[in-house]
Each structure stands twice: as structure tokens, then as C-alpha cells.
Image (cartoon, grey):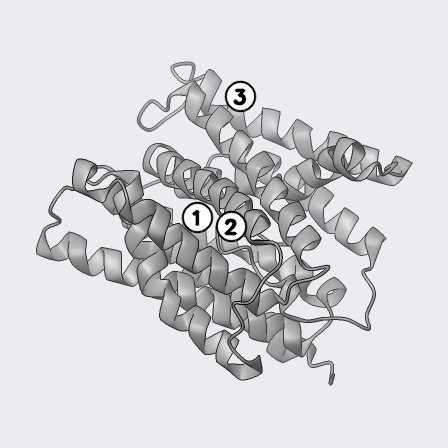
């Protein structure tokens, strides 16, 4: 593989833009449409892009671990529901920065699930990252009414956003386990198919007819999710993960700009400080681990369920 840092960084930054944009559209539609309905259309309209990725190496659905794909899709679906709930209630930038806690939870989950013993550097990074979470939450959510500006934000929304980071970490671990025997395209295909099927089942009971604008947003949500997945697949096929990984955090910039100009959400000082702590801890772990450079393939792509860095 030819290492093209500029191409990889540009593609990855573009992928984070489309992820931030689809979250903004989910925020627009989440106040009037059920979360499961939004997620159904997200998976349905992203499926053609997943098929496009899979067609390059061959569309393979044969699997010996169908139960693993089902479990991974259920957990991913829970994560998607959490994302819709949190982007509807939190400022986009705050939801985005809290989603970056996924690498921190990966460290914690690796202890009981993989029997790993994290290094001292990892424990320091985790401590710094979670201190950033406290700063973000205290800065606006828990101290609202004591100098904070903007609409009140329910404190529970911050806990849901934090829990989504943990669920997102669990989906990443499931993908890694499945990757031992399954190709990345097979995992992505089964995820898209199973999530579309799972969210279609309750539609007759929760269906809310979208208006013309909402329908357009739903199509765009799926298209943007698919485009983001294609771009990130190409990014990690173009350059080493350890080199371009930090560019995944550019999503915070896009979320802040879209939130500011689209929803009038002005990022506060606490969000900035907390964001630096969370992102800094993630970059520290990414640089410290330095994954093997021999294998940079589609398994390193963005988790389609969470839209967060691997």
C-alpha cells in the first residue's frame, strides 16, 4: 500500500463532515419523527453505498457466525437510538465530543472481556479523558441556571451520550472479534441488512408520515451515512491509521460550525476545555499504541452505527 498522508487526511476529514451533517439532519427530524423510523431510513438508504464497497472485493454473505452478526446489529441499533436521542437534546458539538469517549471505554472493556492489562499510560489517558467528560457536563448540563446560556439541557441526556460511548466501544470489540473469521465487507453487509430488517418490524406501530422536507432529510441521512463510510474506507486504505487517526476528531469542528450557524448553538468555554481533554487522551492512546502498519484495511473504517473513530 502506498502511504498518501494528504489523501488519507482529506478523505477522513471529509467523512467526519458528512457524519456531522447527518447528525444535524437527525436533530432536525428527531423532534417530530420516532428514532426507529429515522434509523430505518438511515440504514435503507445507506445500503447501496455498503454494496458499492463490498462489490470491490466481492459480495459475500456466507457466514459461520450469524448469531454474532445479529448480536452486533442489536448492540449497534441501541447505539444508533442513543445517538438520535442525544443529538435531539444536546448541542451538536457537545454530543460529538462525548462520542469521543469510545476509545476510553475500549480500555475499560478490554479488562473483563479480553483479559488485557492496560499500561500506566493508558490509565492516565483514561483519567484525563473522563475528567474532560466531567468538565463538559458540569459546564452546561448540571450547572445550567448559574451563568450558563442557551436552553436548558436535561442532565440525563449527558449520561445517555456517555453511555453511547460505552455501547459504541462494545460494537467495536464485536467487530474485532468477528474480523477474526469474517471479512469487513461481510460484517458491513450483514449489519446493514439486519438493522434495516430490525427497524422495519416496528414501523407499522410507530409510523409517522414525514412531510416533504422531512422525507428529503431522511434520504439525505442514509446517503450521508453511506458516503461517510465510503470516504473513511478510502482514507484508511490510503494511509496508516496511526498517521491520519487524529483527523477523525475534526468532526468536532464540523459539529460546532453546523451547530452554531444552523441551530444557534454557541460552544462554551467548558465544552472547549473538556473537548481538548477528551480528544487529547484519545490522540495520546492512538500515538502510544501505534497499530501494526502492515495491515490497514477496511476493518479500520468508521463504525457505521456510531460514526466515531475506531
Distance between the alpha carbons at the discs numbered 1 and 3 = 19 Å
- Counting from the top left corner in percent of width and height, residue 280 is at 70, 45
Which quarter of the picture shows residue 265?
A: top left
Proximity of marks 2 and 3: CB atoms separated by less than 8 Å: no
Distance between the alpha carbons at the discs numbered 2 and 1 = 6 Å
* Residue 252 numbered tag: 2
Q: Secondary structure at mark 1?
A: helix
On-image quarter of the N terminus: bottom right
Looking at marks 2 and 3 on the same chain, the residue that comes earlier in the sequence is marked by 3
Q: Secondary structure at mark 3?
A: helix
> Which residue appears at 82% of the width and 73% of the height?
294
- Counting from the top left corner in percent of width and height, residue 162 is at 54, 31
Q: Which residue is mark 3?
A: 138
Which quarter of the picture shows residue 18?
A: bottom left
Looking at marks 1 and 3 on the same chain, the residue that comes earlier in the sequence is marked by 3
Q: Is residue 119 or residue 257 the one in the foreground?
A: 119
Q: Secondary structure at mark 2?
A: helix
Label 1: how many residues lie within 10 Å, few (<14), some (14-19) or many (20+)? many
Q: Which residue is mark 1?
A: 256
Amino acid at each position: 500500500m502506498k502511504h498518501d498522508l494528504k489523501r488519507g487526511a482529506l478523505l477522513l476529514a471529509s467523512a467526519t463532515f458528512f457524519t456531522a451533517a447527518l447528525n444535524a439532519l437527525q436533530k432536525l427530524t428527531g423532534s417530530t419523527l420516532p428514532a426507529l423510523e429515522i434509523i430505518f431510513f438511515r440504514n435503507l438508504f445507506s445500503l447501496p453505498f455498503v454494496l458499492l464497497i463490498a462489490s470491490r472485493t466481492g459480495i459475500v454473505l456466507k457466514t459461520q457466525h450469524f448469531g454474532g452478526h445479529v448480536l452486533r446489529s442489536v448492540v449497534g441499533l441501541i447505539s444508533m437510538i442513543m445517538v438520535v436521542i442525544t443529538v435531539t437534546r444536546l448541542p451538536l458539538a457537545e454530543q460529538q465530543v462525548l462520542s469521543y469517549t469510545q476509545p476510553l471505554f475500549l480500555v475499560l472493556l478490554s479488562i473483563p472481556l479480553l483479559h488485557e492489562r492496560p499500561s500506566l499510560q493508558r490509565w492516565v489517558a483514561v483519567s484525563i479523558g473522563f475528567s474532560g467528560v466531567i468538565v463538559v457536563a458540569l459546564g452546561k448540563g448540571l450547572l445550567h441556571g448559574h451563568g450558563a446560556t442557551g436552553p436548558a439541557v436535561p442532565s440525563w441526556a449527558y449520561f445517555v451520550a456517555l453511555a453511547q460511548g460505552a455501547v459504541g466501544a462494545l460494537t467495536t470489540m464485536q467487530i474485532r472479534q468477528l474480523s477474526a473469521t469474517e471479512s469487513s465487507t461481510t460484517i458491513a453487509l450483514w449489519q446493514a441488512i439486519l438493522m434495516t430488517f430490525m427497524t422495519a418490524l416496528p414501523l407499522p406501530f410507530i409510523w409517522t408520515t414525514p412531510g416533504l422536507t422531512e422525507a428529503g432529510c431522511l434520504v439525505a441521512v442514509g446517503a450521508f451515512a453511506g458516503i461517510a463510510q465510503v470516504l473513511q474506507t478510502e482514507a484508511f486504505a490510503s494511509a496508516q491509521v496511526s498517521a491520519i487517526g487524529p483527523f477523525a476528531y475534526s468532526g468536532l469542528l464540523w459539529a460546532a460550525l453546523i451547530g452554531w450557524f444552523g441551530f444557534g448553538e454557541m460552544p462554551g468555554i467548558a465544552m472547549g476545555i473538556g473537548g481538548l481533554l477528551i480528544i487529547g487522551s484519545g490522540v495520546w492512546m492512538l500515538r502510544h499504541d501505534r497499530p501494526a502498519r502492515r495491515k490497514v484495511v477496511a476493518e479500520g473504517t468508521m463504525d457505521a452505527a456510531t460514526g466515531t473513530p475506531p
